[in-house]
Every structure is written in structure tokens, then in C-alpha cells.
Image (spheres, helix red, strand yellow):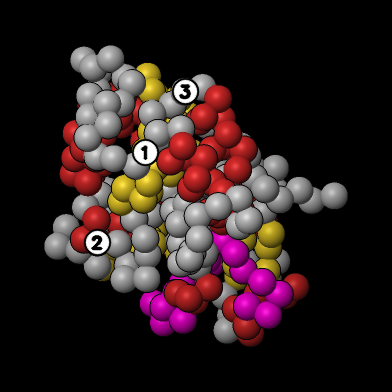
Amino acid sequence: MKCSEIIEYLETLSPKKYACEWDNVGLLVGRSEKEIHRILIALDATESVVKMAADCNADMLITHHPVLFSPIKQVNEDHFTAKKVLTLAEQGICCYAMHTNYDIVGGMAELAASEQYLDLSDVKPMTIEAEEHEGLGRFGRLPSPMTARQVAEYVKERFNLSFVMLYQKKEDRERIYHDIAVLPGSGKSELKTVKKEGYSLYLTGDFGHHEGIDAMDMGVTVIDATHYGLEHIFIDFITKYLKEKLKNENVEIIPVDTGCPIDII
């Protein structure tokens, strides 16, 4: 089966046109006419994942985050990103990224809010960016009233995480929450939207010290599940999606989850 045919399935789910302007999605390395017999699916094209793809003779690597994001001027072993691109090209591995297009349409936030994970009700997009009335993030109602700490434990259980981080004023520790805003990945940029829409509990990732304090001052409690925490679900979803679409083809699909890159010591 040709790489271009697999790409058609991926772009039917999440068309490239919905990717943010600053993003870099699609076939980033390789030839679209290459015959594909083995696919690896991962969240990131890390050095270890690229090596794994090469070692197992994969023909294609599909990731959520792009292997090429910032411009590079030379493709050699002197730069860690260029080195990965060089390995992929030398091994004839097609590398395809579906990033913000998957976040916005057919993808991440809708999956995170679904019965399989958070089991939210009355779900609606945080920002509508497509004709299908989809977009980044979701607002929804929790399956039962909980404190923020109870929600944090619930998130750990549902997403199989060893930890999350909680930014909350001490006086709000016993507060009961009914509704939640969710944005997998990095959600700092949408904090004002969350506040404007009247949500006081926000589940996302990549919050820093200063952003956490700002959120608390704004009256918003933040659960930071890390960038990995709410997005590793991409791996299982795309694996199942392609296995269904390619069930009559001679294509092996291998999910690779290298785990959260952060350890709390």
C-alpha cells in the first residue's frame, strides 16, 4: 500500500487545512509513492523512536508532534533534529505529522472529553475553527461533582498518569466543581477564554509558575497534566483507526508509547 493512500485516510479524519498557520503538518520526510508494510505510531519523533523505527524496518512513522518544527539549514549529524531527519531519509522511512489539524478536527480534545476518558456531558468546543463546529479544547460537565483534588485523582486514573500538578488557592480546596474546561497539550494561551466563558476549573498542560499564579489570581484552578498527559491518547486512537481502515491490507501497525518525559523525584 502506498504512503499516499494511508495519508488519504489520515487527512479524511483531520484535513491539513485545519492546522494552525504556525504549524507544520503532513508528510515531512519521505516519498508519497513509497510502498508501506510497517507503520510506527508515536506522540513524538524522539531520537529513540526514530531509532526504533529504523531497527524494526518500519516504512512509515506517524506522530502527533512534527519532527520538523523550526527551520534547519543543514541536514547532517551536527544538529539533533537534522540528525533524525537524516536517519529517516537514509532508512527510507516516511514521517507524517498530524498536529493541530488533529487537535481541531476529529481529534484530541473530543477524545479526551469522551466516555473513554473524562466522560463529560454537555460538551462544546472551546474555540470553533472548522465547518464541522469543532475546534481546540472542550467545555463540559463532570460526571459527578468533585473537588479539584478529586478531579486530579480522576484524571490520573483515566489517563493512566503517575502525577498531575494543581494550581489552586488554599481557600478553594473544599470547593466543589461541576464543570471543567479541557485543552490537551499546552493551554496557557486560552486561559483568558476559559475565564471569560465562566469556567473556574481548567485541565491542560505546560503551565509554568507565573502562569499558574496568574490563573489563581483570576479565580481559575488549573490541573496541569503535562503536555504528554492528555495527548498520549493519540497513539491508541490512531492505531485503532488505521487498523480498521487497513484491515484488508498487508500493513503492520505498531504503537509506541515511550511514556511521560517528566519524573517527579
State the residue position of label 2: 18
Mark found first going from the N terminus, 2 or 1: 2
Q: What element carries label 1?
A: strand
Which residue range is magenta in the image?
192-211
Amino acid marked by disc 3: Asn
Determine the image quadrant of residue 149: bottom right
C-alpha distance separating marks 2 and 1: 22 Å
State the residue position of label 1: 94
State the residue position of label 3: 57
> Does residue 118 show up?
no
Amino acid marked by disc 2: Tyr
Q: Which residue is drawn at 55% across and 52% down?
A: 76
C-alpha distance separating marks 1 and 3: 12 Å
Asked if residue 208 lies left or right of residue 140, the reply is right
Mark found first going from the N terminus, 1 or 3: 3
Q: Report x, y in % for residue 61.
A: 42, 36
Q: Residue at x 22, y 29 (%)?
A: 2
- Identify whether 3 is placed above or below 183: above
